[in-house]
């Protein structure tokens, strides 16, 4: 386990050296400006607009880290053979994958926390000094906290998928393309299945509908981690839903990383 | 850096800077003649359901953008075409499908869309959608009730929706009062004024406040004329041929001011008074 921590620490440092934090801070600064300029344009539910903007910044920063930094660092290791240097030591390929994943998770966590903190501070300043800005209805810190954790979990799922595609293709562009595709599908699949099942908007064959339903067991349901509506309108959030969704997220990450480790174990590094 | 290099850099910078200023002033000149983008309402003519599928987790942000776009057009328009209002309706529908909880969409639907001829049913459809999701809020239900009453003249549906609104906590007493008025089938213009007052109190944007104020004044003018027509009929046994007849027969001393036009419009067959061409 020490080796895994060591690799994750090195990856975290590498990410900081790659100026990931500067990028995150720029996004956070933009979101702060957006809070104080865009929100006063709305007359009602300004808290909801703040939640939309804050979480959009969080997701964009997280996706940028996962897609550009995560995939970039992994393919760089494989192509520049720096991975061979690590693997020539008593470090298994599984430990390498786990270490890299944990290190990048740390960078994503830092990014999410920085943006969340700036979002909360901007929101507080907005409520205090701009009369148009009001807190969301029935606002509670714990639902906001769960929302941030869920956003982080959904980014971890995307990162795990990115890892799998990177070791499968060993090509950064292909991996970025496939990962982004999974992100889009993960966000839309649930709605598509509901629309297809209802049959009001579009009618498809029973087989097609079954295939789509089967895909929901393979592809991640990222929509489940989206709690923006609950935070913005103070809608009730059941404990069982929260726990089961969190467990689903952790297990999905685990299985994808497990598959990544297996593929990487048999991967020939040229 | 030598002095020569500094001079060359300075000249080059001056040349590029001048080129930028000259070209930009020409671009500005050409673009001045292009109509402002807020003079016509435009939206992506795609189904709201499709928009929901492709918006992913940014559907809330997309709903905000659509509403902002609609309000920019509505805040600056002078003349509107039926196509503009079709686009506004689609924008509101898309925004509500993406975020059915967003009150601002509901508010704009009632404040602007429901008052347009041919849009009453569409506005009610959107408001019902909003009422379904905002189950804690009395306002969307109240708006549905008002629209059934005032625009569609369906008092039964109106009373039902007003009743649903009055049941919710925080519903002001006026909701129940209006519901009672509906049951009695009285005072339609007064009801409209009461509703407009309620919306005026909630409006935060100065432009919108002014628009509502004008609408309230126009309805007060209508109410004055309606009462005068009733008095004329009681005296002469028939409705007047024109609104001028009310002044000629000294029922009223002068025509009430119409914030939306020179004078009020009158249908002598039905006895109804309007403040603009849209009836």
Image: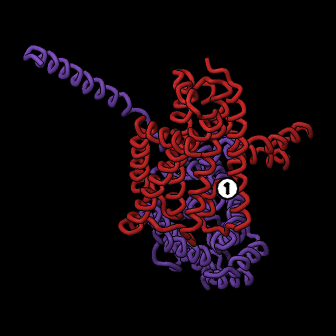
Chain colours: A red, B purple
Local SS, label 1: loop
Vertical comparison of B203 with B90: above or below:
below
Q: Which residue is mark 1?
A: B119
Residue at (72%, 64%) from the top-left corner? B128
Residue closer to the observer: B79 or B279? B79
x%, y% of residue B119?
Answer: 67, 55
> Going by the image, does B29 lie left or right of B142?
left
- The chain letter for the residue carrying disc 1 is B
Residue at (68%, 35%) from the top-left corner? A261
Quadrant location of the C terminus of chain A in the rendered image: top right
Residue at (59%, 25%) from the top-left corner? A173
> Going by the image, does B184 lie left or right of B230?
right
Vertical comparison of B276 with A217: above or below:
below
State the image quarter where residue B274 is shown.
bottom right
x%, y% of residue A252?
Answer: 72, 46
Residue at (47%, 39%) from the top-left corner? A10
- Callout 1 crowding tier (Cα within 10 Å): few <14, some 14–19, many ≥20: some
x%, y% of residue B145?
Answer: 70, 72
> Going by the image, does A126 lie left or right of B87?
left
Residue closer to the observer: B194 or A231? A231
Residue closer to the observer: A187 or A39? A187
State the image quarter where residue B36 is shown.
top left
Residue sitting farthest toward the left: B3
Vertical comparison of A120 with A161: above or below:
below
Residue closer to the observer: B9 or B24? B9
State the image quarter where residue A254 is shown.
top right
Residue sitting farthest toward the front: A90
x%, y% of residue A231?
Answer: 59, 63
């Amino acid at each position: 386990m020490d080796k895994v921590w060591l690799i994750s620490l090195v990856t975290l440092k590498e990410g900081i050296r790659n100026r990931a934090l500067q990028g995150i801070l720029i996004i956070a600064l933009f979101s702060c400006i957006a809070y104080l300029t865009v929100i006063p344009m709305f007359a009602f539910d300004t808290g909801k607009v703040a939640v939309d903007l804050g979480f959009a910044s969080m997701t964009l920063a997280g996706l940028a880290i996962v897609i550009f930094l995560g995939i970039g660092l992994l393919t760089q290791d494989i192509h520049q053979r720096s991975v061979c240097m690590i693997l020539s030591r008593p470090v298994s390929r599984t430990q390498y994958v786990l270490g890299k994943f944990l290190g990048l998770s740390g960078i994503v966590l830092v990014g999410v926390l920085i943006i969340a903190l700036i979002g909360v501070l901007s929101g507080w300043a907005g409520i205090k000094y701009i009369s148009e800005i009001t807190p969301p209805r029935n606002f509670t810190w714990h639902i906001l906290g769960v929302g941030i954790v869920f956003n982080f979990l959904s980014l971890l799922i995307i990162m795990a998928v990115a890892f799998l595609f990177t070791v499968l293709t060993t090509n950064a562009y292909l991996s970025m393309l496939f990962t982004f595709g999974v992100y889009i599908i993960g966000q839309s699949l649930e709605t598509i299945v509901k629309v297809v099942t209802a049959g009001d908007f579009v009618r498809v064959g029973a087989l097609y509908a079954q295939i789509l339903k089967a895909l929901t067991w393979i592809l991640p349901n990222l929509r489940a981690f989206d709690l923006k509506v609950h935070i913005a309108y103070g809608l009730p959030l059941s404990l069982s839903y929260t726990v089961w969704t969190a467990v689903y997220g952790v297990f999905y990450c685990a299985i994808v990383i497990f598959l990544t480790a297996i593929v990487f174990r048999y991967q020939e590094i040229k | 850096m030598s002095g020569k290099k500094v001079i060359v850099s300075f000249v080059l910078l001056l040349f590029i800077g001048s080129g930028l200023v000259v070209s930009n002033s020409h671009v500005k000149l050409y673009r001045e003649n292009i109509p402002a983008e807020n003079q016509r309402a435009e939206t992506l003519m795609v189904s709201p359901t499709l928009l929901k599928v492709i918006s992913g987790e940014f559907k809330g942000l997309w709903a905000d953008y659509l509403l902002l776009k609609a309000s920019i057009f509505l805040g600056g328009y002078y003349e509107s075409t039926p196509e503009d209002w079709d686009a506004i309706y689609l924008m509101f529908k898309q925004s509500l499908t993406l975020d059915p909880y967003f009150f601002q969409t509901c508010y704009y639907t009632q404040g602007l869309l429901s008052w347009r001829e041919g849009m009453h049913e569409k506005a009610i459809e959107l408001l019902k959608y909003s009422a379904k999701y905002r189950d804690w809020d009395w306002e969307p239900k109240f708006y549905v009730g008002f629209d059934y009453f005032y625009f569609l003249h369906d008092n039964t549906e109106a009373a039902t929706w007003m009743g649903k609104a009055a049941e919710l906590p925080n519903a002001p007493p006026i909701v129940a009062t209006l519901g009672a008025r509906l049951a009695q089938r009285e005072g339609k213009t007064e009801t409209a004024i009461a509703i407009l007052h309620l919306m005026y109190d909630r409006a935060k944007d100065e432009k919108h406040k002014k628009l509502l104020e004008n609408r309230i004044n126009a309805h007060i003018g209508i109410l004055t004329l309606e009462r005068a027509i009733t008095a004329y009929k009681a005296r002469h046994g028939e409705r007047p041929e024109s609104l001028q007849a009310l002044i000629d027969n000294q029922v009223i001393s002068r025509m009430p001011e119409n914030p939306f036009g020179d004078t009020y419009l009158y249908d002598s067959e039905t006895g109804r008074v309007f403040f603009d061409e849209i009836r």
